[in-house]
Image (tube, rainbow, N blue to C red):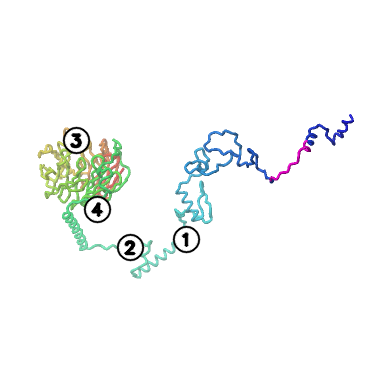
Amino acid sequence: MDLLGNYGGSDDDEERPGSPSADAELFKLSLPVQVTAAPNIDTAGRVLMEGKAVTEAETRHYLDPKARSVQYNLPYRDMAAPVVGPAHPFQKDGLAAGLKNHRAGHVEDTHLQSYAFDEQYNTYHSMGYAAAPGSQALVGKTDAAQGGTVYGNAAKRRKTAEEKAAAAERKQRLQQEAQAQAAAGQPFALTNRLPWAEKQAQVPELTEEQRAHIAKAAEAKEATAAEDVEARGPTSFFHGKADKDYQGRSWLAPPRDKKKESDACFLPKRWIHTWSGHTKGVNAIRFFPGAGQLMLSAGLDGKVKIWDALGSYKCMRTYLGHSKGVKDINFTNDGSKFVSVGYDKNIRLWDTETGQVITTLNTGKLYFCGVFHPEDDKQNVLMAGCADKKIYQFDFNTGDVEQEYNYHLGAVNTVTFIDDARRFVSSSDDKSLRVWEFGIPVQIKYIADPSMHSMPAVTPNPAGTAIICQSLDNQIVTYMTKDRFKQNRKKTFKGHNTAGYACQVNFSPDSKYVMSGDSEGRAFFWEWAQPYKVVRTIKAHDGVCIGVAWHPMESSKVATCGWDGLIKYWD
């Protein structure tokens, strides 16, 4: 027990032999002391990994942006780390994809068009201020802001009452000075130079000698023009880019994708285009057969022009072959040729595409109309109404007169084929209608009445069952052509004023509407089923509206021509 007491002591000061602490102390004393020459290394921020001390940044695992799964436990610092590294030049990933704030990409807070952005950008760099995106507030030098941009000046500042009074006083003072100068007889008075002063324009009246001289000069000019046409001969000018397209199709060919809009026709509501190429009045207009892609016009200036009616609305060709005005024009069935009847007593057959004159008929007589036979195998036959009270049947192949129809007592104004081209109707200044068998110079029906007036314009309906005639007593009368040729008094259209003018009448392609011009420049529309009611009136021209035509393909477009030299297109 005494030996055990030697190892003891107080419980507070010494530990007993055999305890863990005592054994550790004995182990430390038994180890040899080692001396090393390695330098001290700062291990702050480093960890031991595979026997090497590396930084935390080097221990991060960088994921492929396209990876769909993670095969190890990813620390938060790696999940929140930004995508770094070079962008692939051909792939929109990584930094090349940009900052994404939406699953579909990046969405801007405010949408700006390029024009609006450039306007504000240039305004800020030029004037020092601009409008903030998404609001009306200004940013930058708001003190110097005038409310305008570099693309538009600021609104004009209104004058104050003092400025208005000062301006009125100055204006009154200058007017008094001008009146004083004018009263003093000064030739260069201030009145003639003030933009606000009333100018007393003294237009001198022409004397009788001066008026006679002007009239004589105008007649000499017209005679010179007529001599030039006769000396030069008929010619034409092409105004288009090329006479054939890249596929070799002629400029007369209709567009392949053009189809009829609707079988039902509608009244036009607005004015969409004006053709102005004639120097004098336009006497007649005709649409190209079929698609109506072109429109032919006859002018009192002796020119015939053909216009694009579907696309560019440009003049495609001008035909110069008459020294005086052109009275009538008509296409053949295929549109490859047309005839022009002029006041210079010439009838010319033109090639529409090339502009060359194929045949010229000149018998020394004045003709008022020229109509081709409707049948395709008789397109060389022309029926011409003459001022000598006869109807001449010409053959363009030979240039000879094949038949004469001589029963009228006045100049023949129109010739209209009816009953499948077996018969035709003629109207004359003798206030009568006569029906003829084609090829037989004997009338088969004569219609005349003391109450009848001259009918200088006649048009058949598309079905070929009736004709409408423009009577000079301000009404349109109707005659039925099937079975018996007789007047239908229930189909009389009134309301317009055509006394003294040969205003043309026409039908819509579906025969629903009847239209006509009048002497006051208006275009009238009636319904065929309700002839007593005018359904629409359009103020089309300043002078006489002499011609109207409905487009054969576009169901609501109408062309009008007048003696003001204009052709207007309505939709």
Between disc 3 and disc 2, whose residue precedes? 2
Tell me if label 2 and label 1 are in contact, CB under 8 Å. no
Question: Which residue is nearer to you in this view: 84 or 532?
Answer: 84
Tell me if label 3 and label 2 are in contact, CB under 8 Å. no
Alpha carbon separation for disc pair 1 and 4: 51 Å
Nearest-to-viewer mark from 1 and 4: 4
Nearest-to-viewer mark from 3 and 2: 3
Mark 3 sits on what residue? 480
Between disc 3 and disc 4, whose residue precedes? 4
Alpha carbon separation for disc pair 3 and 4: 40 Å
Tell me if label 4 and label 2 are in contact, CB under 8 Å. no
Instruction: Give the magenta-colored segment's residue range.
Output: 27-38
Alpha carbon separation for disc pair 2 and 1: 30 Å
Question: Which residue is nearer to you in this view: 221 or 174?
Answer: 221
Looking at the rendered structure, the kind of residue marked 4 is Thr
| Left or right of 75, for residue 480 | left
Q: Can residue 550 be seen in this view?
A: no
Between disc 1 and disc 3, whose residue precedes? 1
Q: Is 103 located above or below residue 313 in the figure?
A: above
